[in-house]
Image (cartoon, rainbow, N blue to C red):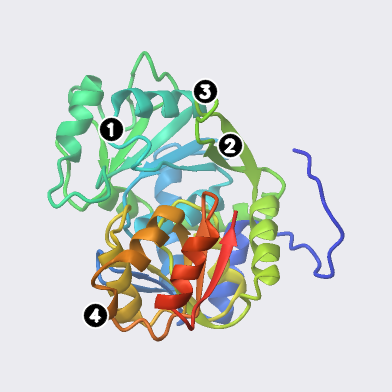
Amino acid sequence: MSYIKSPTDSPLVEGTFGQLLDDTAASWPDTVAYVFKKTGSRITFAEIQDKANRLSAGLKAIGTERGDVVAWLVGHHPEWIYLYFAVAKLGAIVLPLQAHRVGRSDEAMTYSLKKAGVKVLVIGDITGVDQTDDTVPYLCSLFPEVKTAKPGNLQIKRLPKLTSIIVLGETATGIGTYSMNEVLTMGSDAKLIAEVTALQDQLDCHDPFQLVFTSGSTGQPKCVEHSTYSVFNMTRLASISRRMLTEATALYPYLSNPLAVATPLFIPGFTLVIPVSTAPSSVEIMKAIQEERCQTAMILFMKDFHDLIHNRQLGEYDLSSLQIVNVVGNFTPKSLIDQAADVLPNVKIMVVY
């Protein structure tokens, strides 16, 4: 993998995400890194480290190895974070799937899994807004082979590399998949955890670590490779340029970007608030900001930003804690910025596009 690097006053960091998590957990074990509004969870670095270690060992138990691709579609659940670090600790490659791109589209899901050569798929809360879990019926429809297969021994002709599917939850699925609880239980084995721990010194931050699909605006989406070195340093330097290196609580509406994982690692006390839905409404955004006293909204697409400042209920919510809004994804007209200045006079609007 090659890089283009520019001069910087801040030395670039070399370390895998697994190593960075262990260092952070040792320094600030009880610091809350994430608040998940969907589950009511407030997750510390010590908890992330424990779950990541067990999940990493569990993935190893079902045959996941260095260089294998692990994909997931789990909505706004804490497992999204646990998986990211667990896969990193194995030296495997992460592929977070996005509900708005694959959701219930058989074609999009199959294309993504085949293009990336996915070996393990973790799935649950398919659309990110499900009130009832129909993951198992969906899987049986998408992959009829799971009805008769044994867990870990899938044989799907159109996806020859896919061997294992893990379903979010605690109960057995009754089909050829593992439950998340089963994998975590397998990962409680002390020998496996020791093997994962020993593996950390063998991993390289320059190895391929994450696959990201392009938008598909010029054809079928393409897979782009990133390393920990590129992801972490790019995020860190961008945060420095935006003067984000202070303790804060930030709304993070879209759990799909490495920024969500990297930022709490290098800003002690920087807590990310993850809303219930993977496509939150402006009311849900305002409610989360009010309840958690968020100082920053890290990623608001231009449409989200427009809907927020034009929402008739805006005055009903206490957004006095809010200091910065980052607007992304499209050109933002000056007229919209001017309107925001009228309704949110104490908020700095940063257009990151």
Viewer-closest of 344 and 123? 344
- Residue 219, label in figure: 3
Residue 67: which disc? 2
Mark closer to the chain start, 2 or 4: 2
Instruction: Tell me the CA gap for discs 3 and 4.
Output: 43 Å
Going by the numbered disc 1, the residue's amino acid type is Pro
Residue at image point 50% right, 36% down: 215
- Give the spatial CA distance, label 1 vs label 4: 50 Å
Q: Nearer the viewer, mark 2 or mark 3?
A: 3
Q: Residue at x 32, y 57 (%)?
A: 76
Could you say where residue 20 lies in the image, as x and y percent from the top left? 61, 65
Mark 3 vs 1: CB contact within 8 A: no
Which label's residue is closer to the chain start, 3 or 4?
Answer: 3
- Specify the quadrant that holds the N terminus: top right
Q: Nearer the viewer, residue 142 or 280?
A: 280
Residue density around tag 1, few if under 14, some if 14–19, many if 20 or more, within 10 Å: some
